[in-house]
Amino acid sequence: MKVSIWQLGPSMIQQMQRPCNECKGSGETIRDKDRCPQCRGKEHLEFKRKGDDLFVEHTLSLTEALCGFKFALTHLDGRQLLIKSNPAEVLKPGK
């Protein structure tokens, strides 16, 4: 937030609070050198950010959740990450 104070007259001031022009009141900004060159910092279709963490949602079948699974995830920088669970390692939604 940006706070502006004006003197209206002797012993009279006015204080106004408004959202910052840079962050639009969100409290966060992305430096130009850190912005994605394609989207310039808009929301990503697959990845969601919560604080400093990235989350991706992936749907598993009941069989995969109970008996194990393996799939490749392409990260934002192009790396292929292998995501897997072992048989009998029961997964719960949101974990």
Image: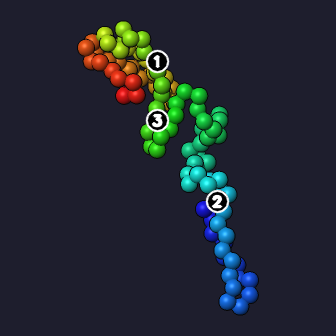
Q: Amino acid at mark 3?
A: Leu
Under circle 1, the secondary element is loop
Q: List the single residue furthest toward the right.
A: 8
Where 88 sits versus 44, above or below?
A: above
Q: Amino acid at mark 2?
A: Cys
* Residue that mark 1 sits on: 59
Is residue 37 in view from this perspective? no
| Camera-side mark, 3 or 1 | 1
- How far apart are the alpha carbons under marks 3 and 1? 17 Å
Q: Which residue appears at 58% of the width and 51% of the height?
A: 26
Under circle 2, the secondary element is loop
* Residue that mark 3 sits on: 54
Q: Which residue appears at 61% of the width and 40% of the height?
A: 41
Q: Quadrant of the rendered structure where residue 7 is?
A: bottom right
Where 34 sits versus 19, above or below?
A: above
Give the percent coordinates (x, y) of residue 48.
52, 34
